[in-house]
Image (tube, rainbow, N blue to C red):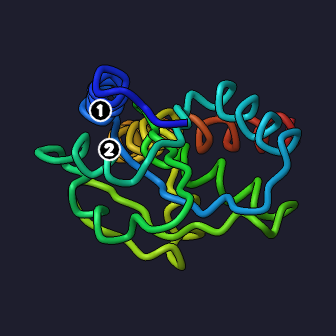
Amino acid sequence: MALRLEQKKAIVASVAEVANRSSSLVAADYKGLSVSEMTALRAQARKAGVYLRVARNTLVRRALKGTSFECINDSLSGPILLAFAGEELSAGARLMRDFAKTNDKLVVKALSLGGKLIDGKQLEAVAKLPTRDEAIASLLAIMKAPVTKFVQTMAAPHTKLVRTLAAVRDEKQQQA
């Protein structure tokens, strides 16, 4: 069924809007997936905060023009499923990796992070990136470590003095 010009413009505008507020994009070949498998993938995507879109490659190229995902245009050939991740940088890659483990028909072609094109073979490395909360927790632990060590160092002489006095007291009680 042919799309009218208004419909094409609406698709381009929709994809461009999502691309402008996304942090990463994963392009995958979905040829051979059944309707039930696609429905399951869409449900998992909603839970993960990932926006999935299937559109004609020519329309996607127009929508991505001028965005940080323009570098992925050369990878768009054949039936392509686009996974846009919002705030969570590795959410799309994680979703595709997990789904591809059980469905070998889903093949990741390319990823785009920060305006850079990443080969689909690097999916595992991108999927292992920490989530935002994990990264913040790691940063806080690193920032807290020197302060904790400083407090322990400052308290050490007092602690040793108290232990020494307690040992002397115990020794005098044994002698008495």
Crowd class of label 1 (few under 14; some 14 to 19; many from 20; radius 10 Å): many
Please report contact status of discs 1 and 2: CB closer than 8 Å, yes or no. Answer: yes
Identify which residue, 74 or 135, lies in the foreground. Answer: 74
Identify which residue, 77 or 173, lies in the foreground. Answer: 77
Picture coordinates of residue 164, whole percent (x, y): 59, 44
Identify which residue, 84 or 154, lies in the foreground. Answer: 84
According to the picture, the residue beneath numbered tag 2 turns out to be 59
Q: Amino acid at mark 2?
A: Leu
Q: Residue at x 66, y 48 (%)?
A: 95
The disc placed on residue 12 is 1
Q: Is residue 18 above or below residue 102?
A: above
Query: Which secondary structure lies at badge 2?
Result: helix
Picture coordinates of residue 67, whole percent (x, y): 17, 44
Classify residue 168 as left or right of residue 117: right
Q: Amino acid at mark 1?
A: Val
Query: Which secondary structure lies at badge 1?
Result: helix
The quadrant in which the N terminus is found is top right
Picture coordinates of residue 78, whole percent (x, y): 52, 66
Classify residue 57 as left or right of residue 2: left
